[in-house]
Structure formats: C-alpha cells, structure tokens
Amino acid sequence: MELAANAPIPEALRAQLVRVDGAIARTGSALADFVSGIEQGRRADATARLRTVNDLAKAVDDRMADVGRV
C-alpha cells in the first residue's frame, strides 16, 4: 500500500496499527518482567513469563499480518 506524504491514514489501517502498537507494548512489558525474574532468581516465574512473551510475539505477528490485509 502506498500513501501520498500528506494523505490521511485510513481508519481501518489506523485501527490495526493501534492494535499492533498495544501488542508490542505488552510484549515489551512481559519481556522486562522476564528479565527481572531472571535477575532476581525467580526462574519458575521467568519461565512462565517467557511463555507469555512468546504468545504476545505471535499476537504481534498476527496483527502485522492483519495490517497487510487492510
């Protein structure tokens, strides 16, 4: 998809980008929690957080694919 430099962003695309942004933010937070767990010696908690990070990363991938379909 190509847009002119000053073209407004279509609402459908804007909505998908907002979803991607939220998913990326949640992934970053979960990754920070994972690192914190490792640093504090909470390996079981960190392992659970890593699963969450993987799930959220997949959600980001899925949402990016959705953006490509808009």
Image (cartoon, rainbow, N blue to C red):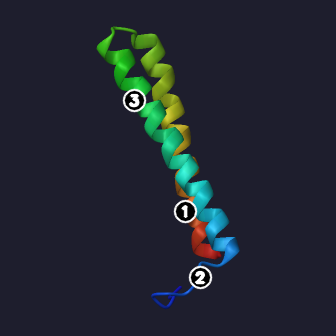
Report which quarter residue 69 is drawn in: bottom right
Q: Quadrant of the C terminus?
A: bottom right
Mark drawn on residue 8: 2
Distance between the alpha carbons at the discs numbered 2 and 3: 34 Å
**Crowd rating for badge 3 (residues with CA inside 10 Å; few <14, some 14–19, many 20+):** some
Marks 3 and 1 in Cβ contact (< 8 Å): no
Nearer to me, 1 or 55: 1
Instruction: Tell me which label, 3 or 1, sits earlier in the chain.
Output: 3
SS for dot 1? helix
Q: Residue at x 57, y 73 (%)?
A: 68
Query: Can you say whether 25 is above or below 53 in the image?
Result: below
The residue under label 1 is 64
- Identify the amino acid type marked 1: Met
Side of 59 relative to 32 (left or right): right
- The image position of residue 16, as x and y in percent, is 63, 64
Q: Secondary structure at mark 2?
A: loop
Question: Residue visible at 51% across and 21% down?
Answer: 48
Foreground tag (3 vs 1):
3
The first of marks 2 and 3 along the sequence is 2
Q: Name the residue type under label 3.
A: Ala
- Identify whether 51 is placed above or below 67: above
Task: Examine the rendered structure and indicate whether residue 59 appears above or below residue 63.
Answer: above
Q: Give how far across and how far down residue 42 sits, in percent.
A: 40, 9
Q: Please provide percent x and percent y for residue 26.
A: 53, 39
The CA span between labels 2 and 1 is 20 Å
Position of 49 relative to 1 (above/below): above
Residue named by callout 3: 32
